[in-house]
């Protein structure tokens, strides 16, 4: 459900078993952008907001860094809600070429440049 909350429920026994058959994989035909949107929504609900929205927002008030200054890191930023994206302080990466190439990432959605 768009804009809904995701809940994780753990069970002691597996609920579903999957068998992989070559050429029949559903995940290989699922668009990368859709998977990114679902993962980002889950991250926001579980990690950023957690159980108590006001307490966790305070926890993240100093901001956070996105690991990965390449395609995936930028796509993650674009998929974040504006409220969460405004808390991003910078990108970090071990690849010095990416760091040297992109000194600032200008994202008009959140109205500021991110180092």
Image (cartoon, grey):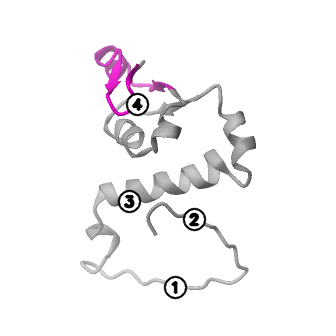
Tell me which numbered mark, 1 or 4, is placed earlier along the sequence: 1
> Quick check: marks 1 and 4 in contact, CB under 8 Å?
no
Dot placed on the residue nearer the N-terminal end, 1 or 2: 2
Alpha-carbon neighbours of circle 1 within 10 Å: few (<14), some, or many (≥20)?
Answer: few
Which mark, by number, is residue 17? 1
Q: Are marks 3 and 1 in contact (CB under 8 Å)?
A: no
Question: Which tag is nearer the camera, tag 1 or tag 2?
Answer: 2
Instruction: Name the quadrant containing residue 60.
Output: top right
Residue 6 - label: 2
Left or right for 30, reference 7: left
Question: Label 3 to label 2, Cα distance in Å?
Answer: 14 Å
Specify whether residue 98 is painted magenta: yes
Element marked by disc 1: loop
**Residue tagged 4:** 110
Alpha carbon of mark 3 to alpha carbon of mark 4: how far?
22 Å
- Judging by the rendered image, the residue that carries numbered circle 3 is 35
Residue at position x 55%, y 51% in the image: 43
Q: Are the residues at dot 1 and dot 2 in contact (C-beta closer than 8 Å)? A: no
Residue at 57%, 63% (x, y): give it: 5
Query: Magenta region: which residues?
Result: 89-113
Q: Nearer the viewer, mark 1 or mark 4?
A: 4
Q: What is the crowding at mark 3: few (fewer than 14 residues within 10 Å), some, or many (at least 20)?
A: few
Which corner quadrant of the image does residue 78 belong to?
A: top left
The mark that comes first in sequence, 3 or 1, is 1
Query: How far is the residue under mark 1 from the one under mark 2?
Result: 21 Å
Label 2 residue SS = loop
* Residue 63 rendering spot, x and y as whole percentages: 59, 28
């Amino acid at each position: 459900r768009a804009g809904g909350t995701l809940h994780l429920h753990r069970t002691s026994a597996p609920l579903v078993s999957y068998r992989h058959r070559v050429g029949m994989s559903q995940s290989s035909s699922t668009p990368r952008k859709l998977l990114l949107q679902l993962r980002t929504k889950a991250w926001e609900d579980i990690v950023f907001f957690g159980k108590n929205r006001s307490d966790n927002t305070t926890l993240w008030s100093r901001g956070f860094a996105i690991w990965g200054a390449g395609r995936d890191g930028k796509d993650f930023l674009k998929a974040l809600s504006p409220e969460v994206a405004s808390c991003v302080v910078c990108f970090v990466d071990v690849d010095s070429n990416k760091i040297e190439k992109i000194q600032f990432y200008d994202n008009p959605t959140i109205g500021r440049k991110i180092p």
